[in-house]
Image (cartoon, rainbow, N blue to C red):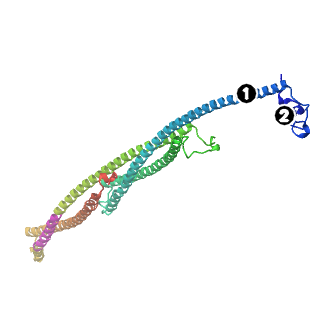
């Protein structure tokens, strides 16, 4: 087997290549040379060159085929990978669009619900303001009725109903204030969850735009470039499960608050309806008590006036009776004087003539009868005068009672009942006006 040229000794190798000090070039090397190849070695050398060239060509051809195959495979793989990535981006766009649409719907629902709750809050504020008028009316009625005279200054049914009305209005005001505070807190919760959903929606919009832009990139795009450090996972990156759960939880909490807001609106509507109805029922009870009390006082006043009229007539009759009694007493003075004068004059009869005759007995009995009649008349005069004084006292008492009743009727009818005509209507108490 021929030895390759590159493995020959240095001297022989240089001679074969016609180089070195023993080469045939130059005048100094003219003549015969001692380091010449053999014919077999020459053929072997040529064969080695042929073989080396064939091996290199074969390796190169094999490398070309492998390179072409690898290039085709990588090109196909790159295309498939890019198409798959584009498909995945499209699916991701659909998922993002779904959650974005759900968030947007929830945001719109929360906004509409918050506006409705704000309207209910305005109704609560109006209803709370409207209760000030009934409270002022009721307290003013109580204060006015304190100016009744002692005879009529009683704790009647009207006062009981007025105190119930004041207590009811206070309870209604406290209930409306608590409900108003709940509405304010619920509106704040609605806005907070709406803001959370808006932030999530904003992130979804930005992500959708980014993924949409990424999905539109292709190999012919002019705004693509190398980013070697981009192919890594961020430490704070979420998983698809946590990503979907985040939006789901936001929507769930927002829906929960929205349902709570709906229930609160229904509660507010029921509260306003019930409180307005209760206030008007109590107002009707107070008005009815006022009407009944005024009727009772009118009846009592009429009876007092009737008795006063009779008392005045009786006073007149008694005064005439007293005058008649005085005249009767005066009329008895002359007969008494006559009888006493007769007795006095007869007491001067002389001696035996001073006799207890029937005339004497009759004159004495006459004086006794007249004296007894005068005493009886005087006693009756005293009784008549006392009766007249009693009648005068009764007249003054009746006139005072009539004045008290008139004052009470004026307070209840002209002050209280007239003031109660300003009582708000049901719609205003319900917060609609």
Q: Where does the magenta region start and end?
A: 311-335
Query: Can the viewer see residue 368 in this picture?
Result: no
Q: Which mark is residue 54?
A: 1
Determine the image quadrant of residue 334.
bottom left
Q: Which mark is residue 17?
A: 2
**Is residue 191 shown above or below 84?**
below
Residue 327 within the segment the image draws in magenta: yes
Tag nearer the camera, 1 or 2 = 2
Instruction: Please rate how many residues cluster around mark 1, counting C-alpha atoms within 10 Å: few if below 14, some from 14 to 19, many from 20.
Output: few
* Disc 1/disc 2 C-alpha distance (Å): 22 Å
Q: Residue furthest top?
A: 1
Q: Main secondary structure of the magenta part?
A: helix
> Relative to residue 345, is residue 414 drawn left or right?
right
**Is residue 169 shown above or below 334?**
above
Q: Quadrant of the C terminus?
A: bottom left
Q: Residue at 63% of width from left, 41% of height from top?
A: 231
């Amino acid at each position: 087997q021929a030895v390759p040229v590159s493995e020959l000794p240095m001297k022989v190798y240089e001679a074969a290549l016609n180089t070195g000090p023993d080469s045939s070039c130059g005048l100094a090397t003219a003549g015969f040379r001692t380091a010449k190849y053999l014919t077999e070695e020459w053929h072997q050398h040529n064969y080695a060159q042929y073989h080396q060239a064939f091996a290199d060509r074969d390796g190169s051809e094999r490398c070309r085929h492998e390179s072409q195959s690898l290039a085709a495979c990588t090109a196909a793989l790159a295309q498939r990978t890019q198409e798959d990535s584009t498909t995945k981006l499209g699916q991701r766009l659909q998922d993002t669009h779904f959650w974005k649409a759900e968030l947007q719907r929830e945001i719109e629902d929360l906004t509409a619900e918050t506006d409705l709750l704000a309207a209910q809050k305005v109704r609560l504020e109006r209803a709370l303001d409207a209760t000030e008028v009934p409270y002022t009316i009721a307290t003013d009625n109580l204060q006015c009725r304190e100016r009744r005279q002692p005879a009529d200054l009683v704790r009647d049914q009207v006062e009981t109903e007025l105190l119930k009305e004041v207590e009811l209005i206070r309870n209604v005001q406290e209930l409306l204030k608590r409900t108003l505070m709940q509405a304010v807190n619920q509106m704040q919760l609605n806005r907070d969850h709406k803001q959370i959903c808006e932030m999530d929606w904003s992130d979804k919009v930005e992500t959708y735009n980014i993924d949409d832009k990424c999905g539109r990139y292709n190999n012919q795009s002019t705004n693509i470039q190398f980013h070697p450090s981009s192919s890594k996972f961020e430490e704070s990156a979420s998983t698809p499960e946590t990503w979907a759960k985040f939006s789901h939880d936001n929507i769930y909490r927002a829906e929960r608050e929205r349902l709570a807001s709906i229930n609160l609106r229904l509660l507010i509507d029921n509260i306003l309806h019930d409180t307005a109805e209760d206030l008007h029922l109590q107002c009707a009870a107070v008005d009815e008590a006022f009407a009944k009390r005024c009727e009772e006082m009118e009846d009592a006043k009429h009876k007092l006036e009737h008795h006063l009229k009779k008392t005045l007539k009786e006073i007149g009759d008694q005064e005439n009776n007293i005058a008649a009694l005085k005249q009767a007493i005066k009329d008895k003075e002359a007969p008494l004087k006559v009888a006493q004068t007769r007795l006095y004059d007869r007491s001067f009869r002389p001696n035996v003539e001073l006799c207890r005759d029937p005339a004497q007995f009759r004159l004495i009995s006459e004086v006794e009868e007249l004296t007894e009649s005068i005493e009886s008349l005087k006693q009756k005069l005293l009784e008549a005068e006392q009766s007249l004084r009693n009648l005068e006292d009764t007249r003054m008492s009746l006139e005072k009672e009539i004045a008290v009743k008139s004052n009470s009727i004026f307070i209840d009818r002209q002050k209280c009942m007239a003031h109660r005509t300003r009582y708000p209507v049901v719609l205003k108490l319900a917060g609609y006006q």
